[in-house]
């Protein structure tokens, strides 16, 4: 059975409410067989967001872009991560 990234984030959110840290969250995700779990670094990121009060488990729209320091110009494009 495939577990999506959003479902993994929901698990992390519940684990944070249960006062689990990033190491505990990640090790529990890794224990589940046959799916692509989030990296430890990503789990740390989401644990931090939920500890700060974030409620949503979905990606927010964000801006990415290329900046050329030499000329001080940037090109940005909206993405949905």
Image: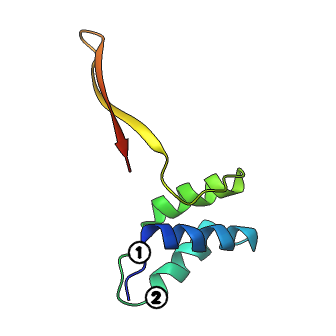
Q: Residue furthest right?
A: 18
> Residue 23 — which label?
none
Q: Residue furthest top?
A: 71
Residue 37: x %, y % from top left = 41, 74
Q: Vertical placement of 40 versus 63: above or below? A: below
Find the distance from the CA under tag 1 to the CA under tag 2. Answer: 8 Å
Query: Which residue shows up at 35% across the image and 42% down it?
Result: 79
Q: Vertical placement of 15 versus 61: above or below? A: below
- Asked whether 64 or 28 is in front, the reply is 64
- Asked whether 63 or 68 is in front, the reply is 63
Q: Are marks 1 and 2 in contact (CB under 8 Å)?
A: yes
Residue 49: x %, y % from top left = 62, 52
Mark 1 lies on a secondary structure that is loop
Query: Which residue shows up at 30% across the image and 10% down it?
Result: 72
User: Which callout, 1 or 2, points at the residue further toward the start of the chain?
Assistant: 2
Mark 2 lies on a secondary structure that is loop
Q: Vertical placement of 67 versus 72: above or below? A: below
Question: How many numbered discs sit on the rendered protein?
Answer: 2
Residue 78: x %, y % from top left = 35, 35
From the image, which quarter does the N terminus lie in?
bottom left
Q: Tell me the crowding category of disc 1: few under 14, some 14 to 19, or many 20 or more residues within 10 angstroms, Cα based.
A: many
Q: Tell me the crowding category of disc 2: few under 14, some 14 to 19, or many 20 or more residues within 10 angstroms, Cα based.
A: few
> Residue 32 — which label?
2
Query: Which residue shows up at 59% across the image and 74% down it?
Result: 11
* Residue named by callout 1: 37
Colouring used for the render: rainbow
Residue 80: x %, y % from top left = 38, 47
């Amino acid at each position: 059975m495939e577990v999506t990234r959003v479902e993994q984030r929901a698990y992390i959110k519940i684990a944070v409410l249960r006062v689990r840290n990033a190491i505990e969250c990640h090790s529990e995700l890794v224990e589940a067989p046959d799916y692509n779990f989030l990296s430890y670094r990503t789990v740390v990121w989401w644990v931090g967001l939920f500890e700060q009060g974030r409620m949503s488990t979905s990606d927010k729209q964000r801006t990415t872009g290329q900046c050329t320091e030499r000329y001080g110009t940037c090109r940005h494009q909206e993405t949905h991560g």
